[in-house]
Amino acid sequence: MTTTAASTAGTNGTAVGFDARTSIGALELKNPVLTASGCAAAGRELGRLYDVAALGAVVTKSILRDARSGRPTPRMAETPSGMLNSIGLQGPGIDAFLAHDLPWLRDHGATAVVSIAGNDAAEFAELAGRLVDEPGVGAIEVNISCPNVANRGLVFACDPGSSAEVVSGVVDVVGGRVPVLAKLSPDVTDIVAIARACLDHGADGLAMVNTTLGMVVDTDTMRPVLAGVTGGLSGPAIRPVAVRCVWQVHAAMRRGDLRPAPVVGIGGILTGLDALQFVLAGASAVQVGTSTFHDPSAPLRVGAELAQALAARGFAGVADAVGHAHTVLAREGAR
Amino acid sequence: MSAVTGTPAAETLGARDRRPDPVQLRCAVLANEPAGAYRRLVLDAGEAARRALPGQFAALAVGEPPTAMLLRRAVSIHAATPGDRRFDGADTLEIVVAAHGPGTEWVTRRRAGDVLDVVAPLGRPFPAPEVGAPTVLVGGGYGSAPLVWLARDLRDAGHRVDVVLGAASRDKLFGLEEAAAVVGPDLVHVTTDDGSAGLRGRVTDALAPLARDGVVVYACGPMAMLRAVHEVASGAGGTSWLAVEESMACGIGVCMTCVLPVRGEDGVTRMTRSCVEGPTFDGDRVRWDAITIGPGGATSAVPADCLGAPVASGKGH
């Protein structure tokens, strides 16, 4: 019997002589593994198991202006190597977040990336304005890609114009005081076009990807399992889709079709080697989401495993490995 | 390590707000034995066993790594025995598992020496009754797993403790002998749907004559049973504490899937996590008007007066 979280925390994501530091714009991170929005609440629950200050950052569940009940139940279905969720952005609203959750994160030394969501561009901007000067906010992640909204036709990240409108509103309010990340949806035909809309309108980086829309039908009751009918699919099942999205965006940056900017890779990361795929495809940092349900210590463990995997491949630091798979492919092409 | 068995009742009861922090452990299986239609597993659980209180649960990872089943299975803790003499003084947790699907079925096939990834103890413990209040413990099927531990603590604290055990048939009863050993055979009341043991009928048939003003009923089992128990207890002027079996993804409070509508102490209804605010709820606070019990289990609507409920037009939500 061993204490999983404690023993993992002890290694703290470091390997001998290896530089685990990375950055997302102006945000310096002690290591490249963050929690993912909606998979770590606001850090407090994981804080009962280990020191959240050891994480690259805690990315909060998306904060809205007002309290929101979320959807009816069932909200969840297990799927092969993944799960569907249909939570509906349940949360207490920005006032409660500022009163209770952000101070907790600050007091516990966590780097906080605050995810925000709104019904329209004005609500996103208002939320960003409430957050930007709060001590302890390391970055703002703009959740323009939640599939569990009542009007699913209005997932901002499925349309370049809507994405640009939300991002530019947030960027104007933030005024460069903290990095702004746009969180993208994989449910688009051309993810580079969405990435371009966000970066051209001032986003400092991209978090990719959110869940992909899915559903499960119960063959006994012969109705959809989720009360919300459809839900967001996450977990290792979507990892190849997410790696592909990061690859395409980083490739566009390399060939000059897209302004270079840090990418945070998200999608089914369960191990350090999973995280390494994202780094090699072009991610400067990664987020561990659904795996945290399976293994609460996963964000720490993945950090340690990624550092070891990078060191074993001769990289002196994370930054040296970002997009390396593109370099390898280019070398082969040149021969 | 001392060879004390169990935890003194005075330390466990009334500890609802004293929620020990959980730990994540790799626990060796010390024993896996049949218990009627179920399996009883004994785990070498160290700190989790030392911290656990009656009414708390454990969340188990399932499947051989790397597993395709990512979600933890929540199981109630049947017993926590620091310094367990049966196992060379190990600090043990006991769980009772029914093979519902591939995940729980995998758990029931673990052998002594196998290792389980466990997060425990989780959830709020059972609350204490008023001093001297008569108590009735109602378990449906293996839902009775946490009740024997509670019965012992309540007995030791001087309460009258009746135990009602119900199931579809005799083989699906759990804890009969253990309950009888704690409270005495006369205070254990058995019902089965098919009459193969005890009274033919439902647990509420046995509960009704025991429910009187001031009674405190503790119940674990399917939602339909919990609702019926609540109605009997409430109708008699008593209190019911109901341990729900919501499906959970994480068990630790981060996924927001295991919610049900519950009215808080401030009178406001919220979609409330059963893993951290529960699993035990005051039956009078559960919004039964929003809960539908169907063949696939219980589902919850969002009551219109729930905090943050969608506005009537649906606009903006």
Image (tube, rainbow, N blue to C red):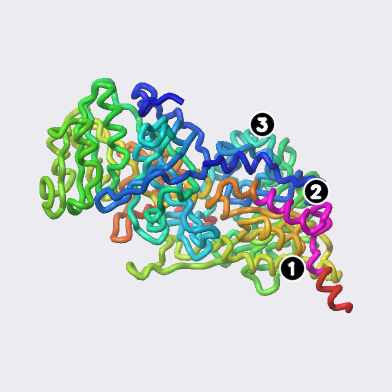
Q: Please state which of residues A63 and B45 is positioned toward the viewer in this rendering.
A: B45
Callout 1–callout 2 Cβ contact below 8 Å:
no
Taking depth in this image into account, of A262 and B92 the one nearest to the observer is B92
Q: Circle 3 sits in a helix, a strand or a loop, which is it? A: helix
Verify CB contact (< 8 Å) between mark 1 and mark 3: no
Front one among A36 and B313:
A36
Q: In the image, what residue type sits under mark 2? A: Phe
Residue with the most extreme right position: A334
Secondary element type, mark 1: helix
Classify A189 as above or below B71.
below
- Is residue A302 in sight in this rendering? yes
Please report the residue visible at 46 percent of the width from the left and 39 percent of the height from the top. B45
Q: Which residues are magenta?
A: A302-326
Residue holding disc 3: A107
Q: Quadrant of residue A201?
A: bottom right
Marked residue nearer the N-terminal end (1 or 2): 2
Location of mark 2 (residue): A18
Q: Name the residue carrying label 1.
A: A247
Q: Is A89 on the left-hand or right-hand side of A157?
A: left
**Residue B284 visible here:** no
